[in-house]
């Protein structure tokens, strides 16, 4: 430092060490106070803090939940299944009263490796009378061990290919397969989701792998090479579904990997978007709820699980979010056309699906996907 | 001295130490365990994909630095030549986009370069093209444009400060001694503004090496950078330990680049004397 600079520093209004430390202490106190209201807030009666896919608490669905539970729902920002389980396992515990995420993806973490290692509390099923209405296929999503239930399914989602009907006609044979997402016909009009798990699962299914989640290194390399070959057809990757929706609605792409809330939202906003039913199967997942050990409103969390399986919520779920309820109430009164539109054929076998299971070696999948992206 | 030391320890040293320690830990779907393993570094060194993307990142960062320099120097020179109110106005205009967030400044290129964007609409309106140009967006070129745009200020400002402090008598003296404008620039102005140039280059290069949002939004299928690879470990695989190892590798490589660069320019020139 030059002498000139030193002298300028010395001319600054004097701040003693005590003043600086005092200021730091004040800042720490202010920081602490800014965090405190959340904890106090959640403990108040009549409020429930949840972390779940935001589409499941879209305005109409949230209204139903709040009305039936007589509670104010505070829904956290859902990022992904990975993020949700990270929050569950975070040091200090989860700050939510109720959480949910994909059963196949989350159950190893939520349930722990053995009895007693569960990261959530056992659910008192006597407080969930609507549990008896869970449909048969969804029972696979009940997480139980030693007679105790830790996870309860409430809905199904599925991933498929979304396409702009003005560009891709419904009767195009490509819409009957995952080929729509990969092959040359719509080159330059395709968007891929920038996520290793789903993209490699879809490509694996398309290439004929019966259990893509179990692909070994050589098979992953083969799938990776296929994707590298087809990457020339892709206009861009997208990181979030909001970004994907914008690309599709803005005409930047006409075909993309998509989830049901995307399709639901775009159709409701008047965009001429449809979802394909690939013969290899849509990629499905069961969403299950669980109550963290640190839940501050256990009774209300039980009540919410029950309401989500109840008639009103179950019947509005598909319309409000695109997801399929795990409750038998959901299809009551639905026309065949609506059942078909929403994809309820997953339950009766008329729509082929394959569950998004957690890969045997996720790191190898990430490396393969990185190779695809960097090629 | 003590407050500054505490500040440095808390905000600069501690995070890097934690990152370094975590790079030897073990991550699984059940979380990250404090452990000691070299497995993460083994993964990084054994799979060529990491080296490939690292080299691509360094290449993009270097190119962005060069383009930023070429774009920013004339702007800085122009600003330094202004006086009074006009100088204030131009500096505010230069800063204006930077009052918004980095992400917004990146997003703004989508409606400009997109298929139905401003540039394509204009080109079609004046009859230059009859169909939208797809290559304006979602490629490495778009990543370069985005990065140059968001980092311009980090290059312009130090160069401007160097030029602004320059004694104008030196330029007059060069002219009096018979040097033409080009010779004066290369023999007087450029050497005297080198501290600012070096400082700006280092700043932009460092920021470019860590870029994540811009390649994600504008890069399409070709713009992946090392930052994207690191982010994936934290946001998708929950593999914080590997993410930390990748971060340490990036820090070391960037440090090495600076060390090589430092053989030509002193560290004090880069970080202190602007």
Image (spheres, coloured by chain):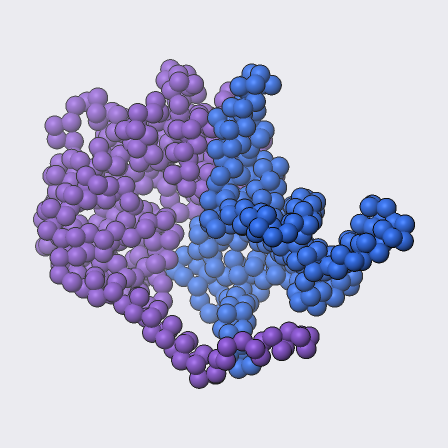
Chain colours: A purple, B blue
Residue found at x 48% / y 51% = B99
Number of numbered callouts drawn: 0
Q: Position of residue A74 (x, y in %)?
A: 23, 53
Q: Quadrant of the N terminus of chain A?
A: bottom right
Q: Position of residue A259 (x, y in %)?
A: 35, 35
Front residue of this view, candidates A369 and B188: B188
Q: Quadrant of the C terminus of chain A?
A: top right
Q: On the rendered structure, is A75 left or right of B28?
A: left
- Residue A26 lies, with reference to residue B69, above or below; the image says below
- Examine the rendering and report whether any part of residue A364 can be seen: no
Front residue of this view, candidates A237 and A361: A237
Q: On the rendered structure, is A282 left or right of A143?
A: right
Q: Residue furthest right?
A: B178
Front residue of this view, candidates A252 and A199: A252
- Examine the rendering and report whether any part of residue B195 can be seen: yes
Q: Position of residue B56 (x, y in %)?
A: 65, 46
Q: Position of residue B194 (x, y in %)?
A: 74, 57
- Residue B87 lies, with reference to residue B136, above or below; the image says below
Kindly indicate the quadrant of the structure image that contains residue A115. bottom left
Residue found at x 26% / y 58% = A96
Residue found at x 37% / y 17% = A170
Q: On the rendered structure, is A210 left or right of A217?
A: left
Residue found at x 76% / y 56% = B168
């Amino acid at each position: 430092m030059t002498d000139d600079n030193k002298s300028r520093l010395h001319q600054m209004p004097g701040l003693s060490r005590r003043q600086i430390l005092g200021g730091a202490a004040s800042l720490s106190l202010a920081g602490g106070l800014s965090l405190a209201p959340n904890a106090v807030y959640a403990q108040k009666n009549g409020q429930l803090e949840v972390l779940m896919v935001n589409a499941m608490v879209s305005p109409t669905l949230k209204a139903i939940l709040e009305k039936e539970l007589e509670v104010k729902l505070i829904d956290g920002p859902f990022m992904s299944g990975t993020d949700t389980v990270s929050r569950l396992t975070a040091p200090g515990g989860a700050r939510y009263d109720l959480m949910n995420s994909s059963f196949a993806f989350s159950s190893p973490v939520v349930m722990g490796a053995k009895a007693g290692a569960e990261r959530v509390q056992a659910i008192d099923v006597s407080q969930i009378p609507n549990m008896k209405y869970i449909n048969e296929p969804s029972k696979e999503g009940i997480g139980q061990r030693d007679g105790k239930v830790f996870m309860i399914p409430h809905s199904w989602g599925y991933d498929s290919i979304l396409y702009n009907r003005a560009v891709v006609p419904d009767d195009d044979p490509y819409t009957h397969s995952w080929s729509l997402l990969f092959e040359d016909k719509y080159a330059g009009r395709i968007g891929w989701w920038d996520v290793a798990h789903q993209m490699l699962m879809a490509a694996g299914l398309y290439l004929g792998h019966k259990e893509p989640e179990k692909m070994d290194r050589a098979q992953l390399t083969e799938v990776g090479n296929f994707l590298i070959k087809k990457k020339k057809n892709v206009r861009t990757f997208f990181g979030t579904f909001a970004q994907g929706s914008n690309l599709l609605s803005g005409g930047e792409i006409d075909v993309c990997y998509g989830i049901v809330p995307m399709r639901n939202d775009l159709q409701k906003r008047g965009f001429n978007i449809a979802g394909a039913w690939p013969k290899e199967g849509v990629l499905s997942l069961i969403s299950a709820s669980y109550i963290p050990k640190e839940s501050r409103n256990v009774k209300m969390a039980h009540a919410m699980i029950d309401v989500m399986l109840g008639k009103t919520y179950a019947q509005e779920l598909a319309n409000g979010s695109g997801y399929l309820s795990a409750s038998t109430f959901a299809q009551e009164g639905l026309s065949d056309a609506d059942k078909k539109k929403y994809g309820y054929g997953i339950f009766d076998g008329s729509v082929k699906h394959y569950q998004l299971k957690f890969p045997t070696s996720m790191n190898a999948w990430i490396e393969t996907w990185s190779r695809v992206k960097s090629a | 001295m003590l407050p500054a030391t505490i500040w440095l320890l808390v905000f600069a040293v501690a995070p890097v130490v934690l990152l370094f320690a975590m790079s030897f830990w073990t991550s699984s779907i059940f979380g990250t365990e404090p452990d000691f393993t070299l497995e993460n570094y083994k993964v990084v060194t054994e799979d060529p994909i990491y080296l490939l993307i690292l080299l691509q990142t360094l290449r993009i960062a270097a190119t962005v630095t060069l383009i930023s320099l070429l774009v920013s120097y004339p702007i800085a020179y122009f600003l330094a030549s202004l006086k009074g109110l006009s100088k204030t106005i131009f500096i505010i205009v230069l800063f204006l986009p930077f009052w918004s967030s980095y992400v917004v400044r990146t997003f703004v290129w989508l409606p400009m370069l997109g298929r139905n964007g401003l540039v394509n609409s204009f080109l079609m309106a004046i009859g230059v093209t009859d169909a939208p140009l797809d290559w304006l967006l979602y490629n490495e070129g778009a990543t370069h444009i985005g990065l140059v745009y968001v980092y311009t200020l980090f290059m312009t400002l130090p160069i401007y400060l160097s030029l602004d402090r320059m004694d104008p008598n030196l330029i007059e003296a060069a002219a009096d001694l018979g040097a033409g404008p080009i010779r004066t620039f290369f023999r007087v102005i450029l050497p005297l503004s080198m501290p600012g140039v070096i400082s700006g280059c280092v700043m932009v290069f460092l920021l470019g090496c860590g870029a994540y949002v811009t390649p994600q939004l504008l890069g399409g299928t070709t713009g992946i950078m090392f930052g994207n690879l690191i982010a994936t470990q934290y946001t998708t695989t929950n593999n914080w330990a590997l993410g930390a190892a990748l971060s340490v590798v990036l820090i070391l490589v960037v440090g090495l680049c600076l060390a090589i660069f430092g053989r030509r320019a002193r560290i004090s020139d880069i970080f202190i004397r602007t």
